[in-house]
Image (tube, rainbow, N blue to C red):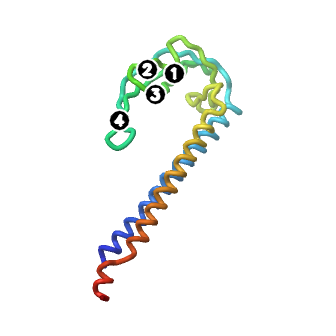
Amino acid sequence: MKQTSEIRKKRNIIPFIIIVIFTISILGIIFNHFNTQRIMRDGLRTTAIVTNVESRNIIVDVGVNRSEQRTRHYTTFEYHVDGQTIAVVRTTETPGSNAAPRLRVGDVVEIYYDAQNPRNFVFADSSGNFSIVGIIFIGILSFVIFKIIRSLNRTKNRGNENPLQEASNG
């Protein structure tokens, strides 16, 4: 009887952990979106120059016993704020090995930077990128969590029938 109770407790904790992870993910997406919008609204516009691009091949786990090769690009942007040069490295990934980076050394991009923290910047053309990706991510994650919780509830309901109890009653 004690084992059954412990198994039920473990089954009950899994949906809780999933919901916590889901909530943290949603809050991160929302924070990122509002931070981007705030910088675009209140930030100062300037141009940044790509001064360095380093690319490295990496292997990413994409499922059980499945991995995928990607190229990670470390792009350095430099821009000037109040006579100081600010250099910020951003990371992006592209599918495939040795994939070409989106930006090359010497490219000039328009950015908005945060006046209180000039190292914090967003691209001037990134107005809706986070919200679309975020909405798609939230939709997929919601569906997956719903399916997991539903299957756990079905398993839990089947587990309520205690074969030991039935054998002792019979």
**Direction front: furthest residue:** 170
For the point 53% across and 11% down, which residue is it? 106
Instruction: Kindly identify which residue carries mark 1.
Output: 87
Task: Find numbered disc 3 in the image and state the secondary structure of the residue it sits on.
Answer: strand
Three-letter amino acid code at disc 2? Ala
- Quick one: SS at disc 1? strand
**Is disc 2 placed on a helix, strand or loop?**
loop
Query: Label 3 belongs to which residue?
Result: 93
Q: Residues within 10 Å of mark 3 (few under 14, many from 20)?
A: some
Q: Position of residue 95 (x, y in %)?
A: 44, 27
Q: Is residue 102 above or below residue 7?
A: above
**Residue carrying label 2:** 99
Q: Do the residues under discs 4 and 1 have CB atoms within 8 angstroms? A: no
Q: From the image, which quarter does the C terminus lie in?
A: bottom left
11 lies left or right of 39: left
Report the mark closest to the observer, 3 or 1: 3
3D distance between C-alphas at marks 1 and 2: 24 Å
Query: Upstream in the sequence, badge 4 or badge 2?
Result: 4
The residue shown at (58%, 42%) is 136
Distance between mark 3 and mark 2 Cα atoms: 9 Å
Q: Nearer the viewer, residue 53 or 168?
A: 168
Which of pointers 3 and 2 lies earlier in the amino acid sequence?
3
Count residues near mark 1 (Cα–Cα under 10 Å), then give few for <14, some for 14-19, many for 20+.
some
Q: CA distance from mark 3 to mark 1?
A: 20 Å
Disc 4 to disc 3, C-alpha distance:
15 Å
The three-letter code of the residue at mark 3 reads: Glu
Q: Work out whether residue 41 or residue 136 is closer to the camera in this orientation and state it.
A: 136
Left or right position of 41 against 11: right
The mark that comes first in sequence, 1 or 2, is 1
